[in-house]
Amino acid sequence: MDFLRPAGWEEALAAKAEHPTAVPIAGGTDVMVEINFDHRRPEYLLDLTRVAELAEWEATDRTVRLGAGVPYTRIIEELRTELPGLALAAHTIGSPQIRNRGTVGGNLGAASPAGDAHPALLAAGAEVEAASVRGTRRIPVEEFFTGVKRHALEPDELIRAVHIRRADGPQQFSKVGTRNAMVIAVCAFAVALHPRTRTVRTGIGSAAPTPVRARAAEEFLGGALEEGGFWDSGAPLDPSVVRRFAELCAGACRPIDDVRGTAAYRRHAVGVMARRTLGWTWEAYREGEGRTAQCA
Ligand SMILES: Cc1cc2nc3c(=O)[nH]c(=O)nc-3n(C[C@H](O)[C@H](O)[C@H](O)COP(=O)(O)OP(=O)(O)OC[C@H]3O[C@@H](n4cnc5c(N)ncnc54)[C@H](O)[C@@H]3O)c2cc1C
């Protein structure tokens, strides 16, 4: 196995163009497990850890451009205000050691239906910046996942960054596992209120072949909030609205039975998480979080 060690981004793209089968390695928390278990024996490993640009982030008024190689620990420490949903998800990932190494670029690269960053990215609204020597393109995160552990990157492409909408309202993330830490999610759910556009977005993990949004639930809740004047009044939500939102979220799942949980349990748990996280986010909104964003 050859180890390619580009010192910069252009060199990394050139190496990937020359060796399209090379497996990129960032934190290595997925790749090294696969190599150790002999699930994968790539001819080339493309080490991205010396590419300084990948470990940087920058924020504008509306967006955070998160380098693919920024580890979870830094997202928690540096971006909890701009990206609260992703920071909450990052908190649940692995252990401190895994969070020090693991990256969102790696989570996307692995494209597991159980990747915990994915529901938060779907709910916040994000685009993956993919690049090759041929140029750069941005892929909406909902189009990035094409199947179980499959994604939309071409063989010569690398993930440079993720452009994530900066939070303008409350966001939540919830995950069910057999214990509180170091678990692959049985299922996960994220919700984000976007008062500026008066929209709601969701993300579901581990309950379909790919991470998915519950679009019917988003449209239903967005409509109910608009028609009832809730964005302006901040009034408590009618329990029937919350119940219907939860039902529609559960209905967006296409789960399977596996060793971690049954399809029926996953569907039920997603409904429960949807109800709870909507309750928490709406309470935060009523208390003022994001209510001024509407005028911005
Ligand atoms: C003990 C343990 C606990 C874990 N717990 C969780 C958990 O709770 N939740 C969770 O979601 N995950 C968990 N994981 C999985 C892993 O930590 C995450 O998926 C992490 O985000 C991977 O990031 P990484 O930088 O280590 O990726 P790597 O292992 O370096 O790479 C992962 C994949 O992404 C590709 N890749 C990396 N960077 C790029 C790039 N810039 N462009 C294109 N492709 C790229 C690689 O080729 C590979 O296919 C756990 C892993 C371990 C070992």
Image (cartoon, helix red, strand yellow):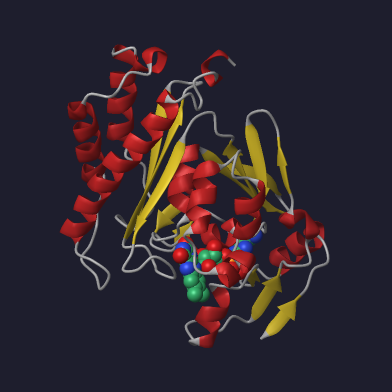
Instruction: From this view, report whether residue 262 is shown above or below residue 22.
Output: above
Residue 157 at x, y percent in the picture: 64, 57
Quarter of the image where one finds residue 179: bottom left
Using residue 135 as the reference point, say whether residue 94 is left or right of it: left
Residue 264 at x, y percent in the picture: 16, 57
Q: Residue sitting at 27 percent across and 70 percent down?
A: 260
Q: Residue sitting at 41 percent across and 13 percent down?
A: 232
Q: Quadrant of ligand 1?
A: bottom right
Q: Residue sitting at 67 percent across and 56 percent down?
A: 70
Name the foreground residue: 110 vs 172.
Answer: 172
Using residue 239 as the reference point, say whether residue 30 is left or right of it: right
Q: How many marks?
A: 0
Instruction: From this view, report whether residue 226 is shown above or below residue 32.
Output: above
Name the foreground residue: 99 vs 206.
Answer: 99
Residue 160 in sight: no
Q: Which residue is at the far right?
A: 7
Residue 159 at x, y percent in the picture: 63, 55
- Quarter of the figure with the C terminus: top right
Residue 63 in sight: yes
Using residue 1 as the reference point, say whether residue 214 is left or right of it: left
Q: Residue sitting at 54 percent across and 40 percent down?
A: 126
Instruction: From this view, report whether residue 83 is shown above or below residue 225.
Output: below
- Quarter of the figure with the N terminus: bottom right
Residue 149 at x, y percent in the picture: 43, 64
Name the foreground residue: 280 vs 269.
Answer: 280
Name the foreground residue: 68 vs 192.
Answer: 192
